[in-house]
Amino acid sequence: MQAFRHLNGLVAPLDRSNVDTDAIIPKQFLKSIKRTGFGPNLFDEWRYRDHGELGMDCSKRPLNPDFVLNQPRYQGVQILLARDNFGCGSSREHAPWAILDFGIRVVIAPSFADIFANNCCKNGILPVVLSSAEVSRLFVEVDATPGYCLDVDLEKQRVTTPGGDVFTFAIDDFRKKCLLEGLDEISLTMQFVAEIKDFEARRMLAEPWLFSG
Amino acid sequence: MHAKTLYDKLWKRHVVRCDDDGTCLLYIDRQLVHEVTSPQAFEGLRLTGRRPWRSAANVAVPDHNVPTTDRSGGIAEPLSRLQVETLDANCAEFGINEFVMNDVRQGIVHIIGPEQGLTLPGMTIVCGDSHTSTHGALGTLAFGIGTSEVEHVLATQCLIQKKARNMLVSVDGQAGRGVTAKDIMLAIIGEIGTAGGTGYVIEYGGDAIQALSVEGRMTVCNMSIEAGAKAGMIAVDDKTIAYVKGRPFAPKGDLWAQAEADWRTLHSDPGAHYDRIVHLDAAAIQPQVTWGTSPEMVTTIDGRVPDPADEPDPVKREGMKAALEYMGLAANTPIVEIYPDTVFLGSCTNARIEDLRAAAAIVKGHKLAGNIKRALVVPGSGLVKKQAEEEGLDTIFKACGFEWREAGCSMCLGMNEDRLSPKERCASTSNRNFEGRQGQGGRTHLVSPAMAAAAAITGHFIDVRTLEV
């Protein structure tokens, strides 16, 4: 996984709550058996005016000019500003894969669905939770300021506005460490092979029926 | 001794080790695998030269991509075929038991787990699928994970987790006639919202939950994710034990006696602490119908589509306006004046035998209403289909005008060819009414099987309790 430490990047606003992972990456693209290449289909049904299928050349498809990520001022976005319960619904990791492939490394929202936030952290994307009031204020500032960038510092756990205002955010220590160092969790767990084997042996004695099938 | 919740007990049993900050390694007893969220995980194993920690802990089935029409000739759609063939090849390479597409035991992963006895009380169960919460109905800790975690479980039989908080949703008293598990769960989501369970494991309790069959409990636990919860679960009781006994992968003989004694301890202790408790009065729950594009956008059959103008929160108001525009509905429309084009009876929420029986009882002797263009019954597994046929349910559905299909996820998410067209309106027994979920531009109303059946024969949503059966 690529590490995430610090980013100063262009912000785009997606002003709706309960954005689900079906919207982030519709089901037809889940037929891919790869981890990459989902970026052109991020928010596919909102982004294009036609029906998208896997393998289509998206550069030739008609764009929906009203969709925020299609607006010229948000080209090159690296930070997505969102509302409550972002990433709800399906557990598909294709959603963060699409976000990452599109070039977005930070999503800021008042709340995230659990599985989505977890999947983000395993792919070098930082989910930042700020208060509803702080997020609402950022929506106003982004809207009013073309080229609006935020500075996101994971080590210090803070988001700094162009005006110098600082918002701090909380993050689980383990997630923070993994993101900062780009750690592979399977390798981390493999350090405990002996403990897992001991646990399994005890479990086999306590609940043998789990190992009989 | 400190009183524990069911979740506390299940968690404690599975902790391999913990760091001081509460980051724990949790042992996983069972991983269920399907074709959509696993190929990249198996590829990860190959790239790192890793093998499954314990192949026998994993069971695979193709369900999302499989056609529900005649499939004796295989899968015509090339991308779907590739994904299913990839699953077959990965299971062969890594020694994982798979119920292949044309095996009678094939079906939706969350239906075949309990059906086969692969889901046993006390287990931790994961799957790269958010509706894994279904299995909590049997007193398990079961939750959906992403593909990176699928690979993690394959390689280590563990997951890195922090403990969630405890929530009790108690549905007190008895539900009225014609009010089903689906109605209870939609009412719960309407009450706490789609993010109401975020950060929690929900235990469902109360008389109305205890009164449900195990299959009904699965419907409730299935939609825990629609309330944002990490997992949903229900204590083990006599019904749970009776349900599991004799299933193909359930323990037998002495092991059964030992297991049963253990499983009977899988309930919350009196006085156990919950971080949040929600009470619902079962008698007040009416048949439910969703009107919008989030499961929390739900009301009762005697209700109306709400008016965004009455919503004080501006973000919610805009969300309601967008939902009504997408759904092609005007504010204040009575729910009984909404006319579906299509009826879908299926999904991991409502495609078990009791669901099919409930719907068949309503449609028996009736024809589809004139405005219903198509109606599908997609049984949850090949064995559900077989049993329904033995009971003659297929004849009832077909005589009414329903198509009788093979098992799979089908139109719940339309990864196969069963999809809604733009603006097509569907009475669906599935779990998500998101934009585009059942097909781009499709309009989904979530209901119980009985309510879907009632809409099929009358042509509009109607209180199933007013129909003579």
Image (spheres, coloured by chain):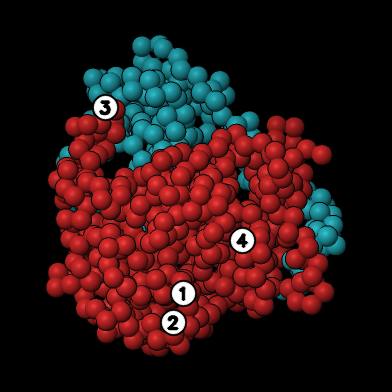
What numbered label is drawn on residue B388? 2
Determine the residue positioned at 14% across, 69% down: B371
Q: Are marks 2 and 1 in contact (CB under 8 Å)?
A: yes
Identify the mark at residue B312; answer none if there is no mark.
3
Location of residue A41 in the rendering, given as x and y in whole percent from the top left corner: 31, 52
Q: Nearer the viewer, residue B433 or B21?
A: B433
Amino acid type, callout 4: Leu
Q: Chain of mark 3?
A: B
* Distance between the alpha carbons at the discs numbered 4 and 3: 41 Å
Chain containing the residue with disc 4: B
Q: How many marks?
A: 4
Circles 2 and 1 on the same subunit: yes
Q: Which residue is mark 4?
A: B138
Q: Which mark is residue B353?
A: 1
> The residue tagged with tag 4: helix, strand or loop?
helix
Q: Colour of chain B?
A: red
Asked if labels 4 and 2 touch by Cβ distance under 8 angstroms, the answer is no
